[in-house]
Amino acid sequence: MTAVVRGLDKVMLASALLASASLVGMVGVVMVDVTKRALDLPPLMATNEIVQYMTMVALVFLALPITFWRGETISAPLIYDRLSPRLQREFALVSDLLVVVVMLGIGYYGYHEAMHQMEIGESGLISGYSLWWVRFAIPVSAALCIVAVVGRSVTRATGILEGESSDVEVAVREGAL
C-alpha cells in the first residue's frame, strides 16, 4: 500500500510541477510585455489571451490535486477542532464525498467542453493561437482530484500517512467499535 501512496505522491507532484511551469510561463510573458511597453516598444500581441486562456487555466486546475492530496485545503479549525473525534471523521467523510461529486461534475462537463472546443478548433481571436488543448487540463485535474481525495480518505482510514492512527484504531480506542 505504501508503494501506491508513493506513486500517488509522485503523480500529484508532477501535476504541481506542471502548474509551476505554467506560473513561470505566465510571469515571463507578462514581464516581457511590461518591459516592451516601458521601452516604448509595441506590446506583445495577445498577452491577455496567453495569460487568461492558456497559463491561468493550467495553473489553477493543475495545482488543485496536490492541494487535496496533502490535505492543505481551507478549513474552519475554530469549529472543527471543537468536535468530537467521531464527528471530525464523519465531517471529513462528508466533505470528501462532496468534493468527489463536485469534481465528477466538473470533469464530466469539462471533458465535453474540451471535446467541443477541439472539434471546432478553438483559437484566440487576436493571436490565432490554438487554445482548445488547454481545456483538457480541467477534466484531467478533476480526475486527479478525485484520486487524491479518495486516496487521502483511504490513507486516513488506514493510518498510512505519517504514522497516524487509523480511523478504525481510534474508533476501537473510543469504544465505538
Image (spheres, helix red, strand yellow):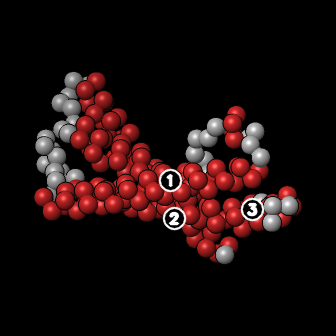
Q: Nearer the viewer, mark 2 or mark 3?
A: 3
Q: Amino acid at mark 3?
A: Asp
Amino acid type of disc 2?
A: Val
The image position of residue 10, as x and y in percent, is 56, 65
Which residue is located at x 56 percent, y 67 percent? Answer: 8
Tell me what residue is drawn at x 13 percent, y 41 percent.
126
User: How much space separates mark 2 and mark 1, taking CA atoms?
Assistant: 11 Å
User: Looking at the picture, does residue 125 appear above or below residue 97?
Assistant: above
The label shown at residue 1 is none
Q: Which residue is mark 1?
A: 99
Give the position of the N terminus as an image quadrant: bottom right
Residue 16 in the image: state x and y as whole percent.
Answer: 49, 54
Q: Is residue 30 left or right of residue 46?
A: right
Q: Secondary structure at mark 1?
A: helix
Does 109 sit above or below residue 7? above
Disc 3/disc 1 C-alpha distance (Å): 20 Å
33 left or right, relative to 166: left
On the rendered image, what quadrant is the C terminus found in?
bottom right
Q: Position of residue 113 (x, y in %)?
A: 24, 56
Marks 2 and 1: which is nearer the front?
Answer: 1
Q: Amino acid at mark 1?
A: Val
Q: Secondary structure at mark 3?
A: helix
Question: What residue is disc 2 on?
Answer: 147
- In the image, 141 versus 176, the foreground residue is 176
Farthest residue, direction front: 176
Q: Is residue 67 above or below residue 108?
A: above
Of residue 121 and residue 115, the one placed in the foreground of this image is 115
**What crowding class fits label 2: few (fewer than 14 Cα within 10 Å), some (14-19), or many (20 or more)?**
some
Measured as percent of width and height from the top left, residue 150 is found at 56, 64
Using the image, tell me which numbered label, if any, was put on residue 167. Answer: 3
Question: Of callouts 3 and 1, which one flags the residue occurring earlier in the amino acid sequence?
Answer: 1
